[in-house]
Amino acid sequence: MTFHHKEFHILSSSDKSKLYCQSWTKSNSNRLLIFHHGFGEHSGRYTNLIRYFSKSDINFYSFDMRGHGNSDGKRGHSDSFDLYVRDLADFVSEVLKREQKERFFLLGHSLGGAITLRYSQEGINQDNILGLILGSPALRVRMDFRKKLKKFAAGILSKISPSSVVDAELNLQYLSHDPEVIESYKQDPLVHGKVSLKMGTELLEIGPQLIKKANVLRCPVLILHGQEDGLVDVNGSTELYKNLIYRNKRIKIYPGFIMN
């Protein structure tokens, strides 16, 4: 049976920002997956993932986080990391209302992995999360990228104008081994490589906090990470896994893969 694609918007309960959302559903599906994309990207860049789930009996929902894709907001900026988490909570509530379901799988990639992890740790709907899947969660930033963020965040401009954005200077070779994926990224008008000084600072601080709070999770967790990830340190994923006390947990590290 063919998936039905829909586009819709929700308003953030925090500041009424308009968030662009998409769904791929089957009328008779009994399972539900909610996906959160990563830094600089948008929900439309995951066609391979959507195609994979189209072969299964799983309804797939995703949205563009604020400051990304077709959603409102200054590119690469949020007034706080917790705004991202609240936006996710708003989106999940809307999806559950539309689906008339209570239980769901939650999948987050890179920065989206950190956001979905924080959402789950706060206990929002945690008992209804059938499984939390984290793909290269942004818990420990690689040293070269960390140095750039620290340089930006430490400048006097970050004190005067924290919403000022800078080019994160991402090395696109870290995104994929596939030249077509890199070229697609470069040509996508909705993609950006910008990060605000405030968010750069928060991204450096939030990962260790999330790892430390791993013991509060009480839902099944699957962590996936490429050993050669050049942006997000795989050690963050292994630290998180070790700190999880819930028995239903699994980590898979892929040698030679980037997976970012």
Image (cartoon, grey):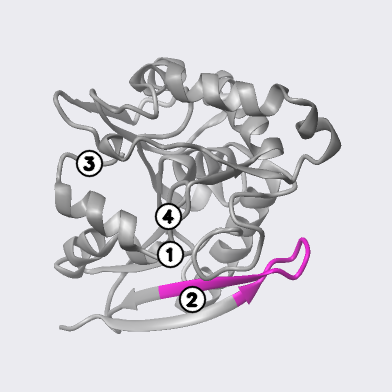
Circles 4 and 1: CB atoms closer than 8 Å: no
Q: Quadrant of the N terminus?
A: bottom left
| First reached walking from the N terminus: tag 2 or tag 1 | 1
Task: Indicate which disc residue 176 carries.
Answer: 3
Identify the residue shown where x is 39% and y is 75%. Answer: 23
Q: Nearer the viewer, residue 247 or 222?
A: 222
Secondary structure under tag 4 reads loop
Q: Circle 2 sits on which residue?
A: 100
Of the two numbered discs 4 and 1 in the rendering, the one whose residue sits closer to the viewer: 4
The amino acid type of the residue labelled 3 equals: Ser
Q: CA distance from mark 4 to mark 3?
A: 14 Å
Secondary structure under tag 3 reads loop
Q: Nearer the viewer, residue 110 or 194?
A: 194
Task: Indicate which disc residue 41 carries.
Answer: 4
Badge 4 local density, few (<14 within 10 Å), some, or many (20+)? many
Identify the residue shown where x is 46% and y is 32%. Answer: 138
| First reached walking from the N terminus: tag 2 or tag 4 | 4
| First reached walking from the N terminus: tag 2 or tag 3 | 2
| First reached walking from the N terminus: tag 4 or tag 1 | 4
Left or right, residue 228 beside residue 35:
left
The amino acid type of the residue labelled 4 equals: Glu
Residue 11: within the magenta? yes
Instruction: Farthest residue to the right: give it.
Output: 160
Q: CA distance from mark 4 to mark 1?
A: 12 Å
